[in-house]
Image (cartoon, helix red, strand yellow):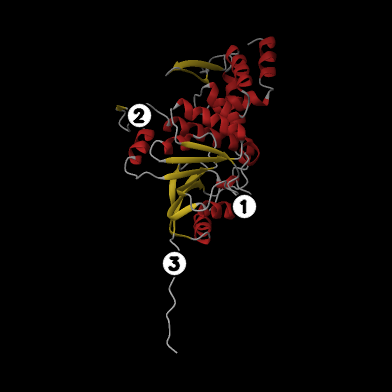
Amino acid sequence: MDMNQAASLYRLLGEEARLRLLRVLGQERLNVTELTAVLGIAQSGVSRHLGLLKDAGLVVETPAGGFTYYRLADAPADGPQHGLRALLHEQFAAAEGTPQARADLARLQEVLRHRRENFDIHGTEAGQLVPGRSWAAWARALGHLLPPLDVADLGCGEGYLTIEAARWARTVTAVDRSATVLRGARALARRHGLTNIVWKRGEIEHVPLDDESIDVALLSQALHHAADPAHAVAEAVRVLRPDGRLLLLDLRPHDQTWVKERLGDRWLGFSDEALAALLKKAGLHHVRVQVGARRASGPFTVTIASGRKGRPAPRTRGVRRDR
């Protein structure tokens, strides 16, 4: 490598975003959309950085499954870039404990989890392909076991859970604070041909529903956005009919502070004891809390909590006494 090539290469690596990109690609091959989610950089920026790194021979692209994936290029031991790769790997190892590197790793693990959970063909541990096996199909199959119910998806976001619930529920009322998000969710439901969803703008601390008007209230990854989680749970219980159920999915306590700025989280998860206390304080009984999903090496653990609203005590008639 001559001096001009070396100077150009070092200038290329003087950009922090490119070093982050190389560090992530050193752990897993990823496509542009996945890299955008990990790095929090606009897709156009990721594509530009990848183009420069590819021209410099630092990354290569490979097509797979209709996507283009990128990974670090191999560096032969006798090649001109071997010494540079060794320096890069030393820098990556030294940066492992920094907040930026830990946040990138946490987002990478979430991207890989989403990749595994959104498949059309699933591989078993033995490597055998099983066409058609999917968690979405199982979720819809379980809906066949449920009676017709009126459901509220509180803090519905993009509406993916709303749409799945609408496949088996009698009606679903989806509530979110963002008008923009609701427009996107409504359009998604139209594309799926679903007509049993009512969309309402509102806060989960002030649910725009009448008392005792639904059978199941869902709070999926919404409670950590609430200014007052106890009040949000109480609102969910308020709109439940007697014997109605609250189903809550959220995160256990974690240390990923980047979610506050990037995702608007107010709370870094809840302990099992805290969730159980919130449900019981709101008047629910038969409260259950259990792990929903976790990875041994990941920072996030999903907790499932549920409870049932009791029926009001029967009113006793006064006993007449003879005088």
Q: Residue at x 64, y 20 (%)?
A: 45
Give the labeled residue for mark 3: 313
Q: Is residue 274 above or below residue 43?
A: below
Q: Quadrant of residue 262?
A: top right
Earlier sequence position, callout 1 versus callout 3:
1
Of residue 10 and residue 285, the one placed in the foreground of this image is 285
Q: Quadrant of the N terminus?
A: top right
Q: Where is 145 relative to 238, above or below?
A: above
Mark 1 neighbour class, 10 Å CA radius: few under 14, some 14 to 19, many 20 or more: few
Q: Secondary structure at mark 2?
A: strand
The earlier-in-sequence mark between 3 and 2 is: 2
3D distance between C-alphas at marks 3 and 2: 50 Å
Q: Name the amino acid type tagged 1.
A: Asp
User: Mark 1 falls on what kind of element?
Assistant: loop
- Check disc 2 and report the residue beneath it: 122
Q: Point out residue 115 in the picture as x, y percentages from the top left corner.
A: 45, 30
Residue drawn where x is 44% and y is 31% of the image: 194
Q: Earlier in the sequence, mark 1 or mark 2?
A: 2
Which sits in the foreground, 320 or 189?
Answer: 320
- In what element is the residue under mark 3? loop
Q: Name which residue lies at 63% across and 40% down.
A: 264
x and y percentages locating residue 6 in the rendered image: 67, 14
Alpha-carbon distance for marks 1 and 2?
Answer: 40 Å
Residue 96 is at least partly visible in this image: no
Query: What type is the residue that disc 3 sits on?
Result: Ala
